[in-house]
Image: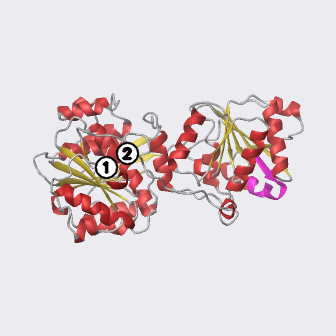
Amino acid sequence: MASLLWGGDAGAAESERLNSHVTAAEQGRAHGRELEQGLPRKNLRGIRSTTVPNIDGSLNTEEDDEEDDVVDLAANSLLNKLIRQSLVESSHRVEVLQKDPSSPLYSVKTFEELRLKEELLKGIYAMGFNRPSKIQEMALPMMLAHPPQNLIAQSQSGTGKTAAFVLAMLSRVNALELFPQCLCLAPTYELALQTGRVVERMGKFCVDVEVMYAIRGNRNWCFKRKLIDLTKIRVFVLDEADVMIDTQGFSDQSIRIQRALPSECQMLLFSATFEDSVWQFAERIIPDPNVIKLRKEELTLNNIRQYYVLCENRKDKYQALCNIYGGITIGQAIIFCQTRRNAKWLTVEMMQDGHQVSLLSGELTVEQRASIIQRFRDGKEKVLITTNVCARGIDVKQVTIVVNFDLPVNQSEEPDYETYLHRIGRTGRFGKKGLAFNMIEVDKLPLLMKIQDHFNSNIKQLDPEDMDEIEKIEY
């Protein structure tokens, strides 16, 4: 019975418990049962879903409410996986750098062109894939090539990247060999579970293939106790490399594992971004790779009309917001606050005035955030009040207005240009027009002017008491 081993980070405290189960798996015992604490080990012919544990835990204190919400890359990645309803049609152009420029470059338009095993093809179609996504068109021929080729790939969330490397792993597994043959490392246990579920769905028609979940808390499962033989691993996948680098200790462990792998092992690395630190890590760990990068088209602000309102305090800001609501037609709106305290205050004020409002902040678990976003998408609430945890990656077509109740600033109290771009970029999407309103105190006006100069855009001042002017605002 062949196995695929998943690595995620659930904390060192649970490592010994899980290691004992993996040992049992290696000996072929406890077949078809679930591990403790929601850690599944299931044959692909008998899969059932497992509850994902919370990431954050209990609510924070009032002192925490004063702090800016720190964006957790791993939590954001998991959130995007939970709320995704379909593949994202990327507008990015794909750039391919081959290790051997003289070799032919192939792409595929159908899964049949890949000459997959029948059970894998059935699994792909059962998952709802009708044709390869843009990243899959280019990556799959490289990932399924003989002899195997290494790959470093940049891919946005939701473009079918996980399905691509899962297909590569399942294609390499020999069900007659009774040991783990594929190893995938993910930066958190929750992300590992999400990836493992893709394996379960795609491999539902495969016979005698198992998925095991391990955690990164300590290295005993891999090195000291030798629960898997790294010299027999055929495919090694590093997923969410940018998040891994943000996770303490993960880079060093990944490199240690890579050094123990056989030279013929296929190595695949995926990352949503390729900052210098990510690229240095990728080049260090993946030898002689093909590279797929995305030429990112600039996120434009041309289709978003931007305004600012001068206010004395947050009560002034709220009154100005009410006047805007009274003067223009609004589909759905996202309002950004810099701190949880302001977000909670504004939520209470708007609810007391009869608005349908939901609150999204970093103290919530990922599952709670996903539920709130889905309700907002379904139109059950018209206003989403949030901190920076929702500044990027969340697309709701009905959003016509974004409000910066507080300007985004960094720790030096300078404008956070990237966050501003991603915040107001929640509107004006999918080819539509949008509106952005900045509520600022007088002493924050220089910061707004820096933002205006940085983006070479025109941010008009709006008098919140002039209802005639407000009513003339057009998308």
Place residue 222 in its image quadrant.
bottom left
> Would residue 393 be visible to someone looking at this image?
no
Picture quarter containing residue 125?
A: top left
Q: Is residue 335 left or right of residue 154?
A: right
Is 443 included in the stretch rendered in magenta? yes
The residue singled out by tag 1 in the image is 40
- Residue 225 highlighted magenta (yes or no): no
Tag 1 near tag 2, CB within 8 Å: yes
Within the image, what quadrant is residue 140 found in?
top left
Instruction: Identify the residue shown where x is 19% and y is 62%.
Output: 230
Q: Position of residue 348 (x, y in %)?
A: 74, 45
**Up-down: is 193 above or below 259?**
above
User: Residue at left 41%, top 52%?
Assistant: 190
Instruction: Write down the residue under mark 2.
Output: 50
x, y (%) of residue 352?
78, 40
Give the overall secondary structure of the magenta segment: helix
Q: Residue at x 29, y 40 (%)?
A: 47
**Bounds of the magenta span?**
438-449
Q: Is residue 221 above or below residue 95?
A: below
Q: Which type of secondary structure does the marked residue at label 1 adopt?
A: loop
